[in-house]
Amino acid sequence: MGIFSRLNRVIKSNLNALIDQAEDPDKMLGQTVADMKSALQRARKELVEAMGSAKRLEKKEKELQQEAVDWERKAVLALERDDEDLAREALRRKARVSNEARHVRERAAEQATTAEAMKDQLERIEKKLDDFKARQKTLAAQVRQARAQHVDASRPAGDRLGGGAFSDLERMADQIDQLDAEVEAHHVLEDPKRTELDARFRALETEEGGDQIEDELAALKAKLGS
């Protein structure tokens, strides 16, 4: 998705520029704020798309559930016409569609959980950016002082530049790395190979559900006979 990797690039490139380049700290900090705002705007757009994907999966699940209901109705209709083979086939298709609905429901839940985690993280980043913006002048002074003192370049940026919002930005970058890994793991779960594997297992589940289909057929026959 690239949301968090872009934000991290903005944070780290601007931190490195502040530490390593002899640019005006006030100008550089202003550019950092502008870059972060732009990256957050793009991230928000992608978040909306991710949430929309979860909604589409939820809609797909409902459609599949309705299709399963329709197949059961067709099975009843076939039994009423004394065609058990046709009723059995309708129940097989119902089982297949029901399994598909279950898998779609699981994917929708995963997508919604990931989107919610992304939303929470972006809100925290926005709050920290507001704090960063409010402290620009103080931070610019810290940068100028650190450069004047020729501090040890091997120390963390937060220590070299007097802590404050820079330490927050470094911690934020670490948090973004973690969430980026979680989002990447989710995408691994959603890859085409996994989708193909799911389809094969659904087929096996349908084949092995013969006893269940016979039980359901018997239950429908009993219900019609009552």
Image (cartoon, rainbow, N blue to C red):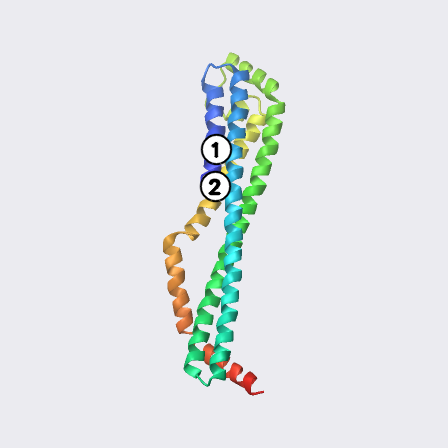
x, y (%) of residue 27?
Answer: 53, 17
- Give the amino acid at mark 2: Asp
Residue at (49, 33) in percent of width and height: 7
On the question of residue 173 being in view, the answer is no
Q: Is residue 165 above or below residue 174?
A: above
Give the Cα distance between marks 2 and 1. Answer: 10 Å
Q: Kindly identify the amino acid type of the residue bearing the numbered disc 1.
A: Asn
Please give the residue where the numbered disc 1 appears in the rendered image: 8
Local crowd at mark 1 within 10 Å, few (<14), some, or many (≥20)? many
Residue at mark 2:
180
118 in relation to 61, above or below: above
- Provide residue 73's location: percent of width, then percent of height: 51, 75
Out of 19 and 57, give the one closest to the viewer: 57
Vertical relation: 140 (above or below) 79: above
Question: Percent from the top left, x then y, of residue 220?
Answer: 52, 81
Question: With 48 as the anchor, is 202 left or right in this view?
Answer: left
| Mark 2 or mark 1, earlier in chain | 1
Cβ atoms under marks 2 and 1 closer than 8 Å:
yes
Q: Residue at x 59, y 38 (%)?
A: 123
Q: Indicate the position of residue 17 as horizontal and vertical percent values.
A: 46, 21
Nearer-the-camera pick, 206 or 140: 206
Please rate how many residues cluster around mark 2, counting C-alpha atoms within 10 Å: few if below 14, some from 14 to 19, many from 20: some
Q: Quadrant of the C terminus?
A: bottom right
Residue extending farthest to the bottom is 225
